[in-house]
Image: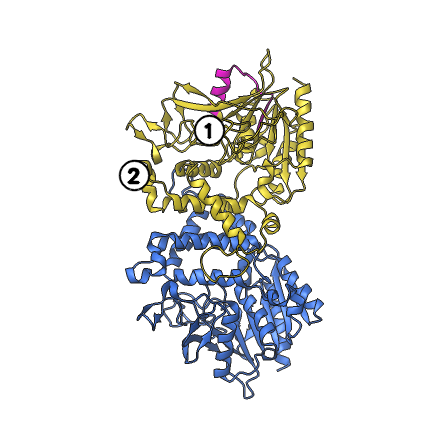
Chain colours: A yellow, B blue
Amino acid sequence: MPETIPANSVGLVTPQTLHFDETLKLDCGQELDSYDIVYETYGELNADKSNAILICHALSGDHHAAGYHSMEDRKPGWWEAAIGSGKPFDTDKFFIVSSNNIGGCKGSTGPASINPETGKPFGSDFPIVTVKDWIRTQVSLSDKLGISQWAAVVGGSLGGMQVLQWSIDYPERLKNAVVIAAAPRLSAQNIAFNEVARQAIITDPEFHNGHFYDYDTVPERGLKLARMLGHITYLSDESMGKKFGRELREGSIKYGYDIEFQIESYLRYQGQSFVHRFDANTYLLMTKALDYFDPAAEYDDNLAKAFERSQAKFFVASFTTDWRFSPERSQEIVRALLDAHKPVTYVEIEAPQGHDAFLMPIPDYFSALQAFMNNVAEEL
Amino acid sequence: MPETIPANSVGLVTPQTLHFDETLKLDCGQELDSYDIVYETYGELNADKSNAILICHALSGDHHAAGYHSMEDRKPGWWEAAIGSGKPFDTDKFFIVSSNNIGGCKGSTGPASINPETGKPFGSDFPIVTVKDWIRTQVSLSDKLGISQWAAVVGGSLGGMQVLQWSIDYPERLKNAVVIAAAPRLSAQNIAFNEVARQAIITDPEFHNGHFYDYDTVPERGLKLARMLGHITYLSDESMGKKFGRELREGSIKYGYDIEFQIESYLRYQGQSFVHRFDANTYLLMTKALDYFDPAAEYDDNLAKAFERSQAKFFVASFTTDWRFSPERSQEIVRALLDAHKPVTYVEIEAPQGHDAFLMPIPDYFSALQAFMNNVAEEL
């Protein structure tokens, strides 16, 4: 619980829900007859509705990007450092919208929602959703909010991929694109890690073919393994080494399978705390959206060609020790933008934190982001 | 099945077993009253027993390093490329011994062996073994074979760690040390991957606290996940990209959880084929031996000090794209050897194959190895 909420926080926020009573045709060929989207907003929309920023979340993220839901909350939203008064996404200047993707587990329609055809949770019958599908729903959200053009669409990791897709599919609907720690598509190694995570979940006997809700259980073991593995890829070898090294939890070796090293303790804790706040089917869906993301595929595998119609100014950032989506992957994006003669600012940030760096208020990173966003504000 | 066995293969080989009726005190504080070691030999021991080479195996390796067990064998031993007539470990010059470590699952005493106290398989009651324990048993094996000094002790990965421990614990018993793709100790990230693999096995309901033999089952799901994860760390991002990229198995996306990408197919196959030829308890033991390996710990965390009594000439090799044990880890070994004023040859091999490169006949690598081993032969 925050004793007092810091003055530069957006403070207490209340998620809102919009119901979309329209058929959503998905890339997989299936349809949703209707769907809900949960979102939060921070700051005030100006009169001509030109100061709106859309935040797209990553794999395990959600709409709660900033502020607190109550005075009892132990932690603020996941990007509290970046959103608020005087921060890079400055709520004194911008109206910020952060929405939960469909397929998620925090309020937007997803696998735990009731399937109108059966009266029971969708479970694994929830259709596979793609980044393109998410953009379609975010466009519908934009329409309902009366925002015809976003001042910026912003995201890190899988969120950054959504930004790329926005700029390609709806070029006239965003003026700026902020793409952090992303990649133009997954590598074989990226897919391989996702596949191990999926197999951990799917082969857990408590998964019940994705209908575990009906059995009043969760595939705890599988989801825990998936999260532990995820965490290895979010941190760098360097940051893990600095944070944990080979430090023993109890000072001496016990020669057993209980926790010996602090890193084991950290991973088990991260895994365990995840299983009761995240849905296994959503985890599967998110990894699939990552695997399938490949905007260049529709443009002869030519990313520059994919960007041709884009009208946004781009800000691209990568982090030196990020090995999930390394600087080379951001450079692919930058090179394609340059080949397509699009304006792009690129910063490669020296940071030991690995992929997780995108969530952190690293001074060089936030300075660059703030400078870019100041320009966005000036051009409103 | 080999139609005909190539002339430079060691040909048909038969594993041998030696029984050691002596109490083995282990680092963990437990004892084994007696134990068996299975081993193979290739080439002929010379009259003064000076031409013997010991091969130490890696995590999932065993004593079958070269040749064929029968004309029906589909594959030769795991280091066929390196062992044989005219090869780096030349059976025209050397007498090569390859033994299976205790705790293993290919014939040496291990978790599937009968525990004399219960009349049932040890299972998880098999004590934790360390690299130092293995060296003790290999010294006993050397004594029984009448080999007072090895011309060389050789190994890759976890095998290379055994070579380092040999040179520190029994300096007078080896003239040369060949350490390939190894590390002086695991990093936090290395331990983290091992921990995920262990948790996959241990939390599999079929594991039955390590006594799955009694239930006539194996923790297939967990061991499969562990192996899939292992394979990601054996290959480089680059080699996975070249081999599989984003190639689809059936040419188009199916939007489901069956195999979409070739890399998924590869991983599942590697995992599945492993579960029926490897023991889950052995996998756990091997990862623990890796985690605990830290020869400098007894020497004030000073690796150079650990090497002070060493009398061997060293050959150290690393591979540019190996991210499990990167060239930097081999360089730590080389630096410590130089600080201790020990003779060392170091080669960093340009190779796209990642950690697995150590098993492969890469020309630059094999040339360097052969040159070093020629010197070893000349000094016999």
On the picture, is A250 further left or further right than B335?
left
On the picture, is B338 further left or further right than A240?
right
Looking at the image, which is closer to me, A105 or A2?
A: A2
Amino acid type, label 2: Tyr
> Badge 1 sits on which subunit?
A
Question: Residue at the top extreme?
Answer: A47
Residue A332 position within the rendered picture, expressed as x and y whole percent measured from the top left: 61, 38
The residue that label 1 is drawn on is A101
Asked whether residue B108 is drawn in magenta, I would say no
The residue that label 2 is drawn on is A215
Residue B205 position within the rendered picture, expressed as x and y whole percent measured from the top left: 34, 52
Residue B45, relative to residue A335: is it above or below? below
What is the quadrant of residue A366 in the picture? top right
Asked whether residue A137 is drawn in magenta, I would say yes
On the picture, is A99 further left or further right than B335?
left
Residue A273, relative to residue B6: is it above or below? above
Magenta range? A136-154
| Label 2: how many Cα within 10 Å (few below 14, some 14–19, many 20+) | few
Quadrant where the C terminus of chain A lies?
Answer: top right
Residue positioned 38% across, 58% down in the render:
B275
What is the quadrant of residue A296 in the picture? top right
Residue B251 position within the rendered picture, expressed as x and y whole percent measured from the top left: 42, 41
Residue A77 visible? The answer is yes
Residue positioned 44% across, 78% down in the render:
B23
Are circles 2 and 1 on residues that touch, CB within 8 Å? no
Residue A128 position within the rendered picture, expressed as x and y whole percent measured from the top left: 40, 33
Give me the C-alpha separation between circle 2 and circle 1.
Answer: 26 Å
Amino acid type, label 1: Asn
Residue B216 visible? The answer is no
> Badge 2 sits on which subunit?
A
| Mark nearer the N terminus (2 vs 1) | 1
